[in-house]
Image: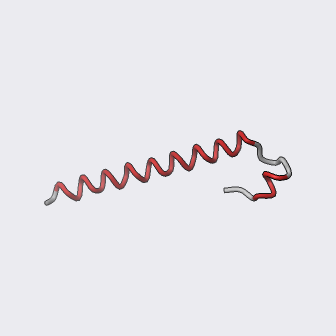
């Protein structure tokens, strides 16, 4: 999500890293929910 150099030169700080980490967590959760919902819909047809 970012260049390593940006961390080293101070362009990005810990708050930026935390935001990126939160975004990845939300993305993973949304993906998990989508797959769970698809499984439920798929299994209803059986």
Residue at point 43%, 53% (across, down) = 31
Residue at point 30%, 56% (across, down) = 38
Q: In the picture provided, is 26 more to the left or to the right than 42?
A: right
Q: In the picture, which quadrant includes the C terminus?
A: bottom left
Residue 7, position in %: x, y? 78, 51
Residue 40, position in %: x, y? 24, 52
How many numbered callouts?
Answer: 0
Residue at point 57%, 46% (across, down) = 23
Residue at point 76%, 58% (across, down) = 4
Q: In the picture, which quadrant includes the N terminus?
A: bottom right
Q: Residue furthest right?
A: 9
Q: In the picture provided, is 18 more to the left or to the right than 40?
A: right
> Is the image coloured rainbow, by chain, by secondary structure, or in one colour?
secondary structure
Q: Residue furthest left?
A: 46
Q: In the picture provided, is 20 more to the left or to the right than 5?
A: left
Residue 18, position in %: x, y? 65, 42
């Amino acid at each position: 999500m970012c260049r390593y150099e940006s961390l080293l030169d101070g362009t990005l700080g810990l708050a930026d890293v935390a935001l990126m980490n939160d975004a990845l967590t939300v993305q993973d959760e949304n993906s998990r929910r989508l797959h769970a919902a698809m499984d439920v819909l798929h299994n209803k047809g059986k």
